[in-house]
Image (cartoon, rainbow, N blue to C red):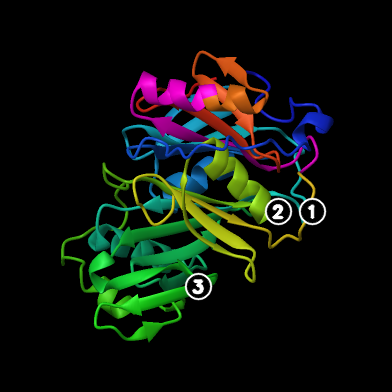
Amino acid sequence: MNNMKNNIPSDQANEKPAAPAEHYSIHPATQVGLVSLTVSNLDTQIDFYQNTLGFQLHWREANRAALGAGEQDLLVLVEEPGANKFPRVTGLYHFAIVFPDRRELARAVARLFSLRVRNYPTDHIQTKTTYLDDPEGNGIELYAESPEDGVMGIRDGSFFAMRADGTPSDGREPLDVEALFSHLQPDDRLDVPVPPGTRLGHVHLHVREVEEAVAFYHGILGFDVMGVSKSFQAAFVSAGGYHHHIGLNAWQGVGAPHPPAGARGLRFFTVTLPNQAALDEVIARIEKAGIPANQTERGYLIFDPSQNGVLLTLQGQEIRY
């Protein structure tokens, strides 16, 4: 798996695959597992994820490293010195790390505050979150679930949010940080690693066309559509009724090109299936749709129509390449 990006001819990558007509939903226990990024300075990135976010370094081999919460890898970094970041292209908008509870999110946000790292605490009602960038401009969301507070999503083509008491919200209000910090205990340290159970909650992608991306992730892979907004050029898809495992937007411009070779940013993210039968079902649909796939010992690497890499694999599979 030495060439995990830009290995599909451009004429194939630009084709719009035809989605199978029959209804199909991907296995409800499907999750997103990890994100792999091309970086230009591995040491700087490892330092940030360890010392600013509290990730643990799971392994490092030559120009590659993986980090997480001590269990499955959540982030795989591959260094390509001289790699550049390009504007107005498809790729990663952000990847989202979900914490086990508000206390652990509070610890993470307090850590950012103590280090004077710029971040943007936001109340999405059904989640409490903050946003920031790593040193190379990769977007990150840190969040905890809070469904007891209400809901947020896309309904009838528009974003909506409603609190549990029935009052409306725009879903993007400043987070009450003081209330969040009330979950901390007096002896909670800020310099400890993120806890076991911290995982990748979702990925949000820049795509060239939202409708085309939905046809791929829903019509072929089988993620359920949780909402589409033509006016906002955005959509959410998920497995098992989750609010979203994959966000899609065309905010870089409809028809935005994919990054050229040598770009920093997303290499691929994993979609993890709970068993071989579930994985085989998705692979059969990919083959039926005529989508090129690179079979490896770790899974099947495919690219969406915007050439965002997706590695289909089994849950618990180590991704070391």
- The reply to whether callout 1 and callout 2 are in contact (CB within 8 Å) is yes
In space, the residues marked 2 and 3 are separated at their CA atoms by 18 Å
The C terminus is located in which quarter? top right
**Residue extending furthest toward the right:** 11
Sequence-wise, the earlier of marks 2 and 3 is 3
| Image coords of residue 251 (percent x, y) | 68, 63
- The reply to whether callout 3 and callout 1 are in contact (CB within 8 Å) is no
- What is the magenta range? 259-284
310 or 50: nearer the viewer: 310
- Secondary structure at badge 2 equals loop
**Residue extending furthest toward the bottom:** 167
302 or 282: nearer the viewer: 282
Q: Amino acid at mark 3?
A: Phe
Residue visible at 78% across and 38% down? 14
Q: Amino acid at mark 2?
A: Glu
In space, the residues marked 1 and 2 are separated at their CA atoms by 6 Å
Whether residue 212 appears in magenta in the rendering, the answer is no
- Secondary structure at badge 1 equals loop
Residue visible at 63% across and 22% down? 293
Q: Which mark is residue 159?
A: 3
Residue 26 appears in the figure? yes
Sequence-wise, the earlier of marks 1 and 2 is 2
Choose top left, top right, bottom left or bottom right for residue 273.
Answer: top left
**Residue extending furthest toward the left:** 186
| Image coords of residue 52 (percent x, y) | 44, 53
